Amino acid sequence: MRGTIGIIGFREAGATFAKAASWQERALVFDIAKSRLATMTELGVMPCRDMGEAVTGAAIVLSLVTADQALQVARECAGLIAPEALFCDMNSIAPGTKREAARAFADAGRRYVDVAVMAPVNPARMAVPLNISGPDAQEAESRLRDAGFTRTTVVGDAIGRASAIKLVRSVMVKGLEALTAEMMLAAHAEDVAEAVLASLDASEKTISWATRADYNLDRMLVHGRRRAAEMAEAAQMLRDLGIDPLMTQGTVTRQQALGDVGAEFTIESLPEGFTAKLAAITATPKGEN
């Protein structure tokens, strides 16, 4: 079982999966950031000098890089993985981008699978929902389950279908977060936050809007940069469909701005409560963009 899982990119998702499933020496890992070496050593996975070393001999390769690097990584791996291996592209990129990546694998006689991670990896860890599509989706599902993933769904045999489901959904989910931030910044500036939130509570009782506003701001401060990259891919998807991504492009800008502010904090030092978060955002010029 040694080295049967190749991992490209070892940030939150890769490290979370490796720890939760106790992959240890099953996982060969490559990340361009040398700072990740300590985490690899701690979790007992096998650090690699380059992508070739990480994917050679692996039965399944998980690509968990940033959205802007996903296509290039796929193109490079197409010429490196074994013929019987499956390359699972788990990055949040546009369906068209995944189809472009898949063509590189087809040209090399290798196999590519579209995998969409449908929820935050924490706290779900190995129970995070995965949508899988492509000609080899059924086999990929079996191998992902062997690796420890417990909530997998095959959604079709077309590359791009899994990502389309995720990104179309993200237009709403991340858009609501961005609209929440815009609403709360305006409410804070006019000193009407409590009244606005109470008004929203009167029309919807699932959770309080104060709780929702704090949660949405928290997610953007912690993950805004990554979500901005994902929503840039969603905007590209809309353009590919002939739809002008007016709101989605605004979501990219807002998520990026709050992510830039959040980068100044650690998880432990993030302000608690929406009032404290708004104070931090408005005290930073980037948060006013």
Image: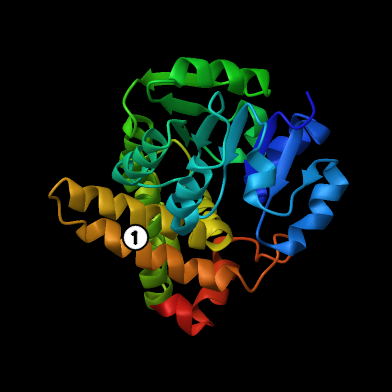
Q: How many labels does the image show?
A: 1
Q: In which quarter of the image is the C terminus?
A: bottom left
Is residue 180 positioned above or below 169 on the image?
below
Q: For residue 278, say whether it is visible.
A: no
Q: Quadrant of the N terminus?
A: top right
> Which residue in the rendered view is the most extreme toward the left?
242
User: Which residue is drawn at the image coordinates 44% and 20% (left, top)?
Assistant: 136
Is residue 194 positioned above or below 17 on the image?
below
User: Which residue is drawn at the image coordinates 76% and 63% (left, top)?
Assistant: 35
Q: For residue 123, say whether it is visible.
A: yes
Amino acid at circle 1? Thr
Q: Is residue 269 left or right of residue 82?
A: right
Q: Residue 228 in the image: state x and y as whole percent.
A: 42, 60
From the image, tell me which residue sits under label 1.
Answer: 251
Q: Which colour scheme is used?
A: rainbow
Image quadrant where residue 222 sits:
bottom right
Image quadrant where residue 270 sits:
bottom right
Circle 1 packing at 10 Å, graded few (<14), some (14-19), many (20+), is many
